[in-house]
Image: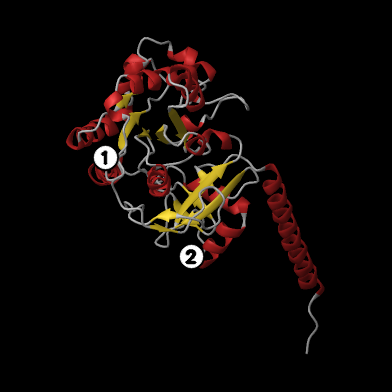
Amino acid sequence: MGRTPPAAQKWGFRSLCALLGLAAALGFSEILFRWCKPTPCVPLIAAREYMDFWFEDGVPLWRQHQRAGQANEACPQQHPAATRIAIFGSSIFWGSGLPEGEPSFSERLQKRLDVAAPGAFCVMNFAQSGFRYDQNALLARTLIPRYRPALAFWGIWALEPYRYSVLGDRAYDLHQIAIGADGYPRAFPLPARLNRVLFRNSRLYEHATLKLSRGASSPDGRPIWKNYAGVDLPRIIRWSRSFGTTLVPVFCPRLDRPFAEWASSPDESVSVPEVEAAIRRERVPAIRLGDTLADQDYLRLRFDSQYHYNDAGHEAVAGVFFRWIMDHPSLLISSERGSTEERDIDYGAGRRGRLSGSPPTAR
């Protein structure tokens, strides 16, 4: 049996060193990547030290700790006869952009109502940064039967009807990402199974895949909004009504233009006509924040050019809601109709507790 030539041994050793070096570099990059935690290329929800994160009926849910008090769930116990007002929405209502410790508009609204009628109102803000229809609808299934609010304000913004894709223990917005038949993004010519394993276990590979795939797929938003306006929103409106709750959609404008021009945004041109038609059919009131703030300087109120308000903005929005509530006294009485059948969940803790069992389906 012949010996391996020295040249072949040399190339074999070099190849092995190269592979080991590449593996070490990738391992170091993975460790560095996990430590640095760069901003994701797409909206991505995963377990974090600053929030509870769990899945219910396949829908990702979370509750951040920074503004836990604004849910104000102790108020109904302290004031059983108070009129309850629930708020469902995204980071706009949660208060992204506000300095830590600064109250959001809902806490300011509570203070205004307390001055006007001490102990007569409980404002409970269940919004969370990143929430969309699925998250809000699933929480509404728990909280509307539990608290029987007279009003439920429902924030509507550009990504409200878009759903997260659950891949492993993380949730992604992939509506602008090219995905394979298995639902996973594909950016490299690897076997599907290997692609899934790497995507779920390597943060470096995940980030690179999302970065290279972004923009490869951008579906027409009109069918999505048509389904939202024709199916999802009417469903939650009618279901809320069965518990004596009037659901009030709130159009949240993008803050890249004056409030008087909010309806000219491309997002609004796609969503607002369909949603407003649905609202008219359901005969519920709505709030168009852009209209109510038309006399305000949008630059003075905004935190960024997206949707988020600064301190002055939250104060102005609190004033809008206060005036609207005072102008609609007939909507401040909640009846006791509706089923109270319950099943298990614990909102905000990731453990099982109680959840109403006659909900609109969250998909």
- Tell whether label 2 touches label 1 (CB within 8 Å): no
Nearest the viewer among 289 and 170 is 289
270 sits left or right of 119 in the view: left
Tell me residue 34's x, y (percent). Answer: 68, 48
> So how many labels did they put on this image?
2
Q: Is residue 61 above or below residue 334?
A: below
Element type where label 2 sits in the image: helix
Q: Mark 1 or 2 closer to N-term? A: 2
Quadrant where the image shows the N terminus: bottom right
Q: Is residue 338 visible?
A: yes
- Residue that carries the numbered disc 2 in the rendered image: 192
Per the rendering, the mark at residue 222 is 1
242 sits left or right of 22 in the view: left
Residue beneath the point at 26% across and 29% down: 285
Q: Is residue 338 above or below residue 16?
A: above
Residue beneath the point at 34% across and 17% down: 292
Residue beneath the point at 25% across and 44% down: 238
Tell me residue 339's x, y (percent). Answer: 31, 53
Nearest the viewer among 13 and 341 is 341
Per the rendering, the mark at residue 350 is none
Crowdedness near tag 1: few (<14), some (14–19) or many (≥20) residues, C-alpha within 10 Å: few
Amino acid bearing label 1:
Arg
Nearest the viewer among 149 and 272 is 149
Tell me residue 47's x, y (percent). Answer: 59, 50
Crowdedness near tag 2: few (<14), some (14–19) or many (≥20) residues, C-alpha within 10 Å: some
Q: Is residue 220 visible?
A: no
Element type where label 1 sits in the image: helix
Tell me residue 314's x, y (percent). Answer: 49, 21
